[in-house]
Amino acid sequence: MTDTVDLGLPSLRDVPKTRVPQKAGDFKTDQEVRWCPGCGDYAILAAVQGFLPSLGVARENIVFVSGIGCSSRFPYYVQTYGMHSIHGRAPAIATGLSVSRPDLSVWVVTGDGDALSIGGNHLIHALRRNVNLKILLFNNQIYGLTKGQYSPTSEPGKVTKSTPLGSLDYPFNPLSLAIGADATFVARSIDSDRKHLTSVLQAAAAHEGTALVEIYQNCNIFNDGAFDAVKDSSVRDANTLALQDGEPLLTADGKRGVIRDEHGGLRLVDEPNLHDVIRHDATLDDSSYAYSLSRLDSQVTPIGVFRAVERPSYDALMAEQLATATSTAGPDELRKLLHGPNTWTVD
């Protein structure tokens, strides 16, 4: 475990708490929820609405920003402020909102197509900057809203309307991508596991900086059963790896465990010696462990918090910089800069 260090930096977040107790029903709108019957989005919506009262934050101080896609209908169904924004640009819009309004709790809702295709650039820069955002990435490994084309997370050989002979693309691993961008909080949960999803949302909400939560979400129309290996009660215990700090990395059935391989990476083995099994530590500052953990997906599916490290948020650093500039240069210096000789006039 790493030691906590007080960096003495100001925090920009000052979200007012509500004095009136809230319940899940307070976060439901009068809008008809319009997803396909059986869609995993319903379960995620219910989990989020049930979780929000625990924040103790008034509805008017919570904002959901989405892009384009099935998941991006979310702001219509949550009784807070919200914006259904531009394809892939939700992180950029939410960044501006977060740094300019310290009184708001800002959440981004996106999908694997929205975030990792047209929005990939915006996502990685929000992550590396560590803006105070909570990003929920619904991953169903397909384009649902546009009726079943392959997405950046679809497996090779995927036959869809846009790849009738099978996809030739290698897919993104969203968590590997996030850890590669040096995200400070990275986690994964499943739409149908409300208890686990709620615990991950609580951890993300408590994190100072950008928190990315990938949520496996079943699209029962265009990609049904994509996550049966981790949802079917007859096989999931053998295929899932619960991540709990300080606990050994063992599959839920206890038959397989994670050890170090000869190259320093991680490897899943059968009937391991418990002495050799790695104990999970999400707080390691070196991201190589969390990255190696994310690469186990071809052997087993880790579920939980992969990485949670402390680092000053972009918001806090900006507040400090502005405070320093104001105290040393003052408004007159800024005025001189804006009205100085390095300008031109357009006729």
Image: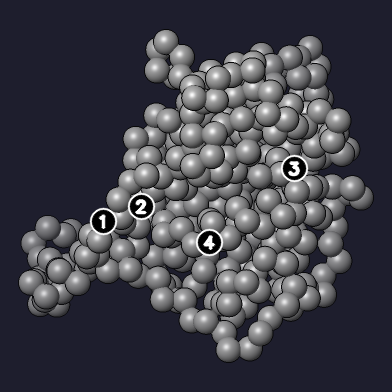
Q: Where is residue 32 in the image (x, y as percent from the top left)?
A: 86, 66
The C terminus, quarter of image: bottom left
Distance from disc 2 to disc 1, alpha carbons, whole Å, reads: 9 Å
Q: Are there few (<14), some (14-19), or many (20+) residues within 10 Å of tag 4? A: many
**Along the polypeptide, which appears first: circle 4 or circle 1?**
1
Q: Which of marks 3 and 4 is in front?
A: 4
Residue under label 3: 217
- Between the C-alphas of marks 3 and 4, the distance is 20 Å
In the rendering, at what x and y percent does residue 151 appear? Answer: 68, 30
N-terminal of the pair, mark 1 or mark 3, is: 1
Q: What's under tag 1, amino acid-wise? A: Val
Q: What residue is rendered at 80% in x and 37% in y? A: 231
The amino acid on which the numbered mark 3 sits, given as a three-letter code, is: Gln
Q: Is residue 241 above or below residue 159?
A: below
Q: Residue at x 8, y 62 (%)?
A: 341
Label 2 sits on a secondary structure element that is loop
Cα separation between marks 4 and 1: 20 Å
Q: Name the residue under label 2.
A: 310
Cβ atoms at labels 2 and 1 below 8 Å apart: yes
**SS under mark 4:** helix
Is label 3 in a helix, a strand or a loop?
loop
